[in-house]
Amino acid sequence: MNSLNPVRWSSSDLEAFGALVQTRHFTRAAERCHLSQSAFSQKIRRLELAVGARLFERSTRQVSLTPEGEVLAQEVLRLEQELQQALGRLQALAGLQAGRVAVAALPSMAAVWLPGLVAQWRQQHPQVQLSVHDTLAQGATALLREGRVDFALTAGGDLREFDTELLLTEPYWLVCPASHPLAARGPAGAHWADLGGEELIHLARSSSVRQQIERLDLPPTWRTSPLEVEHLATLAGLVRAGLGLSLVPALTLFHFTGPGLAAVPFQEPALARPLVLARRKGQALSVAAQALRELLRQRLATPAAALPPP
């Protein structure tokens, strides 16, 4: 039965084979497949030509499997079981009964947004593992680019290689020692003109905050401090010690609530940080990642959750 020309067969031929294995009767198997007996016989014949061996012994009284047919029947059964298992796993993923989702976030976004989000996620979907990576902007985009996270919560930088959606725009605040004259401004806040002659302490150049301030390309009337730090806790300590002032986004204000510090709104609309959700361009999110994104959107719809008061 060997042929130099390969015979094309289809999944419906395997279905016909399975029906005949179960019924051991051509007529009943053909009826099960809703085929005429001749059409059904052609499917079995095509499958036998494809494998190069007879699969059934036919007699007037019964149909039985050949040894080769037994091998194929076992393989078909194994494939069916594996398919059922795969479908079961997919159903669990689609139903949020299994799986995992990973997110990268700037430290300020991670500290303010993610604790409550993670707690709510674990309560609603305890069987779906949620991983969180808190990192600066460059680290977040690197994790996203490498496929190690489903999406990143970030701000600033060149995000053209990703699909992004704006979550909200975050205002800036001026932080200063409590004894500084600007601390008495209250809700009236401060402006660029108020920084003339002041010493401004910047965060590291790798931070989204520093990048955004520099992108405005303003002629500085202030003095740039030689002190440059990566951690907001360090920045708070330097400001408290009277070594300078700093501009920080609203989500970071929890670092500047201790004694000896004051924060006033910085009333310059051009200095506002867009907070975005970034994901790999053209790549769909998993069901779990979509659910996490929707949960985040719902939480951010509450102003107190999005930007807690200082």
Image (cartoon, grey):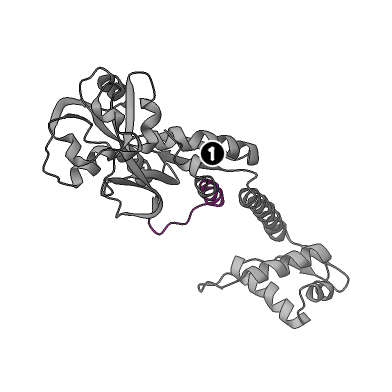
* Residue 4 appears left or right of 108: right
- Which of the two residues, 251 or 148, is positioned nearer the viewer here? 251
Whole-percent x and y of residue 87? 65, 54
Magenta region's main secondary structure?
helix
- Which of the two residues, 149 or 66, is positioned nearer the viewer here? 149
Residue 285 on the magenta span = yes
State whether residue 47 appears in this view: yes
Q: Residue at x 25, y 24 (%)?
A: 180
Q: Residue at x 11, y 37 (%)?
A: 221
What's the amino acid at mark 1? Leu
- Which of the two residues, 96 or 252, is positioned nearer the viewer here? 252
State whether residue 1 appears in this view: no
Q: Is residue 119 above or below residue 237?
A: below
Q: Is residue 70 above or below residue 97?
A: below
Quarter of image, res 254: top left
Magenta residues, as a range?
281-296
